[in-house]
Image (tube, rainbow, N blue to C red):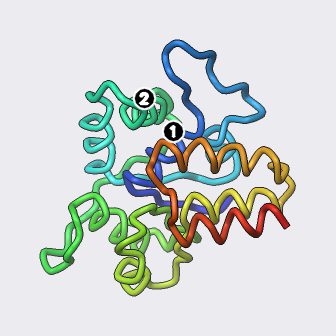
């Protein structure tokens, strides 16, 4: 099984794609994006990312519920300590996740920091950078998700994460719709 290292933004997106509001039923297992990711990959996260998830989970909003969903399954993550590069101009979570991805020679790095993807990409040694919209497309190509399921998840996550008008998201949507 391939290793996927995720930062906080990517994990929150997976959690949002798997969680619903308290008044709604949980997402059925066949539509649970986090469960699918955990089944398809060995998912690694730095300790500091788990700390950031705890902080996000303290908020009573969709992001907090998404982080809580991930934390509820944290026993399925491989959590490791990672060193920080003092010169890396991103927050500690992305810094540690990039370092961990390079350290374990991860196949994939999941990150939804769309404004900083170029910097993150340049910092990865032999790891492919993916966003949640790209990961959804991968699941469709691998027949783990149908186009409709992926579009539904993308719509739910995009609405919660304020991705309207984002070119990465729009490109993924157009590929899934064709």
Query: What residue is shown with label 1?
Result: 15
Query: How many labels sit on residues?
Result: 2
Indicate the position of residue 134 as horizontal and vertical percent values: 64, 65
Task: Check the image and report above or below for 6 versus 160.
Answer: below
- How packed is label 1: few (under 14 Cα within 10 Å), some, or many (20 or more)? many
- How packed is label 2: few (under 14 Cα within 10 Å), some, or many (20 or more)? many
Instruction: Name the residue located 78 percent from the left edge and 44 percent from the top edge.
Output: 149
Mark 1 element type: helix
Quarter holding residue 137 = bottom right
Of the image marks 1 and 2, the number of the one nearer the N terminus: 1
Task: Check the image and report above or below for 72 versus 102.
Answer: above
Instruction: Name the residue located 65 percent from the left edge and 71 percent from the top edge.
Output: 171
Task: Check the image and report above or below for 174 versus 24.
Answer: below
14 with respect to 89 (left or right): right
Query: What residue is shown with label 2?
Result: 65
Indicate the position of residue 175 as horizontal and vertical percent values: 76, 69
Indicate the position of residue 172 as horizontal and vertical percent values: 67, 66
Instruction: Name the residue located 37 percent from the left edge and 51 percent from the top edge.
Output: 8
Front residue of 122 and 78: 122
Extreme residue in the front direction: 165
Front residue of 80 and 159: 159
Q: CA distance from mark 1 to mark 2?
A: 7 Å
Quarter holding residue 118 = bottom left
Quarter holding residue 176 = bottom right
Q: Mark 2 and mark 1 in contact (Cβ < 8 Å)? A: yes
Which quadrant of the figure contains the N terminus? Answer: bottom right
Label placed on residue 168: none
76 with respect to 112 (left or right): right
Which quadrant of the figure contains the C terminus? Answer: bottom right
Instruction: Name the residue located 26 percent from the left edge and 50 percent from the top edge.
Output: 48
160 with respect to 177 (left or right): left
Mark 2 element type: helix
């Amino acid at each position: 099984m391939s290793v996927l290292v995720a930062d906080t933004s990517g994990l929150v997106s997976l959690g949002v794609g798997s969680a619903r509001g308290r008044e709604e039923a949980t997402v059925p297992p066949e539509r649970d994006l986090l469960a699918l990711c955990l089944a398809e990959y060995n998912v690694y996260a730095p300790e500091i990312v788990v700390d950031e998830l705890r902080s996000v989970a303290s908020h009573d909003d969709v992001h907090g519920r998404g982080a809580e969903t991930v934390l509820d399954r944290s026993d399925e993550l491989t959590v490791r300590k990672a060193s920080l590069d003092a010169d890396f101009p991103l927050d500690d979570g992305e810094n540690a996740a990039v370092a961990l991805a390079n350290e374990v020679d991860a196949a994939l790095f999941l990150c939804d920091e769309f404004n900083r993807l170029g910097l993150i990409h340049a910092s990865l040694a032999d790891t492919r950078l993916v966003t949640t919209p790209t990961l959804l497309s991968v699941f469709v190509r691998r027949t783990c998700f149908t186009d409709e399921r992926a579009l539904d998840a993308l719509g739910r996550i995009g609405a919660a994460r304020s991705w309207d008008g984002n070119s990465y998201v729009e490109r993924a949507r157009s590929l899934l719709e064709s």
